Image (spheres, grey):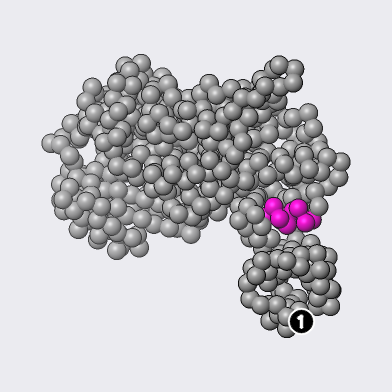
Amino acid sequence: MLWKSPNPAFTALLESLAQEHIPLHLVGGVVRDLLLERHREVTDLDLVVETGDVLNTARRVADRLGWSYFALDETRAVARLVFMPGTGETLVCDIASLRASTLETDLLLRDFTINAMAISDPLATPRLVDPCRGQDDLQRRLIRRVSTVSLADDPVRLLRAVRFAAQLEFTIEDATAAQIRRLSDYLTRVSTERVRDELWKSVTAPQPVQAIELLAQLGLLPIVLPEVTALEGVRQSAPHTADVYHHTLRAVDYAANLARWVLGKPAHIDPDLAEALGKWRYQLRRHLVAPLAAGRPRSDWLIWYALLHDIGKPATQSVEAGASGESRTRFFGHEEVGAQLSAARLEHLRFARAEIDAATAVIQHHMRPHHLHSAFPAEPISRRACFRFFRDTGGRQANPAPGIDVLLLALADVQAIYGAPPPDWSSYLQHLAGLFAYALDKPAQPVVPLVNGSILMHQFGLQPGVQLGQLLEYLTEAQMVGEITTREEALAHAARWLDNVPQAAQ
């Protein structure tokens, strides 16, 4: 059976279009996914019609069924219909006129053979149209260009080949791969937004490491993410067991598996880690499914954080001679430099400001959990240190999201150092569990200050300025960690602070 509706709303849409008495064909990715029996993954339909007024027809059908209508391209008669059935997913259907005189010729204008197939008349007498042997390539799990001009016609297809290979776990045909390498510079002719969207889908595919390696092999990585390419061959000292580039790939793999585990998907994750995080899995899942912007969820951003977290190392590399004559490579300040480079790259790719700010904060602070682990070698991390961690990572106890992302990245990063859980894994997990507990165990209530600036100025004869701000911050921290609970205790704390800092700047 060629057509099996992935959603009743799509069947209703096709039936309504059929009432318009126009020849109708399913084309592109939906045909590929139906032949691969990936029915549940189909949320987008692409349709072409041979005759009639496409835009007016699409508008009439949308009004009849309650779909939203958009004219994507009035000149070429391309319409988009959008429907949100209340299940949390969005269904999209693009309807266009044939771009050529016949359906077969139209299919020859497409990118890859597995996308150059159509199901003609899907509801009544469905017939597969496959002029490029795409069905054979599906069986061979092969990404193959439709023709020698397919890639040059639209250079974003260079990235799209990687995306399909990563999403479907297919191989790119040799001649197609060779042409991608030759045309890699053509990517500079593509709009930034289209590059961003294809790159995002590749890096967040089921096998992100394979996608990144494929981008590198095809000469595309230096163009779209030159900062990652620069990590190759940058050596690191023990306990690292890989150069920065391969450490980064490991971190990406650990981050992707951690995200999949949190989301309840099949994943390879250390059992001790699963046990340590198990009690917060639901809360972490709610955190990761939330989008930062444009429907891009934090679960996918965790993979990007892992990809970018060490891009500051090449610029901060230094070699020191040890007492025994052995040299040691250091990367002082690589977090700050990496945050700056990440912000610049994400701005270039035109991600949303909220996404750029979140990535900057996570990368800038990704070493903090490691440092806290070292600072408390035989005891739990103090509540004051927990408070400062979430404060400094950009969140508050009532909204600890940036700090949660830092902790998840740190778990991937520390395993990537060794290629396995580190020797002090149990202690490390206990420390990070303490941080997760501080943020997630109790729903935080808004902190009502025990005293305000007016009270402090009246009580101690202070003036507005830096000193007053520092004192208020000190009292807030003391209140958050439970050191003071009453106004009297707050004033006593303030008096002691002023005695110890009598010359604080005004």
Image point (18%, 53%), residue name? 74
In screen coordinates, is 175 left or right of 374? Answer: left
Image point (67%, 55%), residue name? 390
Residue 297 placement (x, y as % from top left): 52, 49
Image point (16%, 50%), residue name? 75
Q: Is residue 132 at least partly visible in the picture?
A: yes
Nearer to me, 211 or 308: 308
- In the rendered view, would you say 378 is above or below 439? above
**Quadrant in the picture for the C terminus:** bottom right
Residue 207 placement (x, y as % from top left): 52, 30
Q: Is residue 43 magenta?
A: no
Nearer to me, 48 or 195: 195
Residue position for label 1: 459
| Magenta stretch in the rendered image | 383-390
Residue 304 placement (x, y as % from top left): 52, 40
Secondary structure beneath dot 1 equals: helix
Residue with the most extreme right position: 378
Q: Is residue 274 at least partly visible in the picture?
A: no
Nearer to me, 489 or 247: 489
Q: The residue under label 1 is which amino acid type?
A: Gln
In screen coordinates, is 422 left or right of 9? Answer: right
**Which of the 4 image quarters holds residue 449?**
bottom right
